[in-house]
Image (cartoon, grey):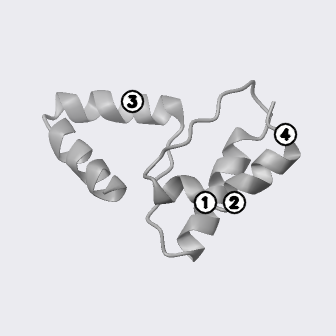
């Protein structure tokens, strides 16, 4: 469980300065999506580029892109966001 003070620390967005990703794991209804979207909005307000995927959506997208032989192009795009 994420403690309240730790969740506030996330809004400093320090993890973006060192190109670190976040993955939230937990049961349905625990606020993972809400927290992810809130952090994304805050990052956008600070001029950062943001991409958000649920695990299911990202998995399906990767399979689809691999079938279309476009996976490499997508991964290069993600790498540009990081660096």
Q: Quadrant of residue 38?
A: bottom right
Residue beneath label 3, please?
Answer: 60
Residue count near mark 4 (Cα–Cα under 10 Å), binned few <14, some 14–19, many ≥20: few
Q: Which one is in front in this view, the residue at disc 3 or the one at disc 4?
A: 4
Residue beneath label 1, please?
Answer: 13
Residue count near mark 3 (Cα–Cα under 10 Å), binned few <14, some 14–19, many ≥20: few
Direction from residue 63 to residue 9 in the image, left or right:
right
Q: Which disc, if any, is residue 11?
A: 2
Q: Earlier in the sequence, mark 3 or mark 4?
A: 4
Q: Residue at the location (30% across, 57% down)? A: 83
Say which of 69 and 26 sits in front: 26
Q: CA distance from mark 3 to mark 4?
A: 32 Å
Residue beneath label 4, please?
Answer: 3
Q: Secondary structure at mark 3?
A: helix
Residue count near mark 1 (Cα–Cα under 10 Å), binned few <14, some 14–19, many ≥20: some
Q: Secondary structure at mark 4?
A: loop
**Pointer 1 with pointer 4, Cβ within 8 A:** no
Q: CA distance from mark 1 to mark 2?
A: 5 Å
Q: Residue at the location (58% across, 58% down)? A: 14
């Amino acid at each position: 469980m994420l403690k309240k003070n730790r969740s506030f620390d996330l809004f400093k967005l320090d993890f973006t300065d060192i190109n670190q990703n976040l993955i939230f794991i937990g049961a349905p209804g625990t606020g993972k999506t809400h927290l992810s979207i809130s952090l994304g909005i805050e990052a956008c307000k600070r001029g950062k580029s943001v991409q958000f995927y649920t695990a299911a959506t990202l998995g399906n997208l990767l399979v689809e892109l691999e079938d279309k032989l476009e996976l490499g192009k997508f991964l290069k795009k993600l790498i540009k966001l990081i660096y």
